[in-house]
Amino acid sequence: MNNQEKLQVMKAALLDQRKEIVSDLNDKKGYFSNSVLRNSHIDNINHKVDGLCKELELEKSSIKNLDSFNENTLALIDETLSKK
C-alpha cells in the first residue's frame, strides 16, 4: 500500500469516526437537553474533522509531489547511468 492509499484509508476512517460520534450524540439527546447545545457540539466535531480532512488532502498532495520528484530523480539517475 503506497502513501496515497494509506491517506485515503485514514480519511475514510476519520469520516467513519465522525459519523459514529454524531450518531452517538444524537442517541444521547437527553444528555444534551438543549438541542442548540447538542447541535453546537456536532458542528464543532464536524469542523474539526473537516480541518483534519483538509490536512490529509494537503499531506496527500505533498506526498504526490514527493513521489513525482522521486520518479523524476530516479529517471535522471537512470539517464545519467546510461550515459556512462
Image (cartoon, rainbow, N blue to C red):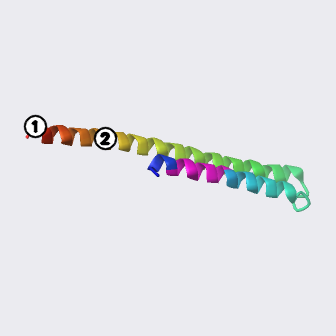
Q: Residues within 10 Å of mark 1 (few under 14, many from 20)?
A: few
Q: Which residue is outermost to the left?
A: 84
Residue at 89% in and 57% down: 29
Choose between 21 and 78: the one closer to the eye.
78
Q: Residues within 10 Å of mark 2 (few under 14, many from 20)?
A: few
Residue at 86% in and 57% down: 27
Residue where numbered disc 2 is placed: 71
Task: Point out the stretch of residues depicted in magenta.
Answer: 6-15
Residue at 28% in and 38% down: 72
Choose between 76 and 35: the one closer to the eye.
76
Residue where numbered disc 1 is placed: 83
**Three-letter code, disc 1:** Lys
Choose between 63 and 44: the one closer to the eye.
63
Image position, residue 7 (x, y; %): 52, 49
Q: Secondary structure at mark 1?
A: loop
Compared across the picture, whether 10 is left or right of 84 comes to right
> Which quadrant of the rendered structure holds the C terminus?
top left
Q: Secondary structure at mark 2?
A: helix
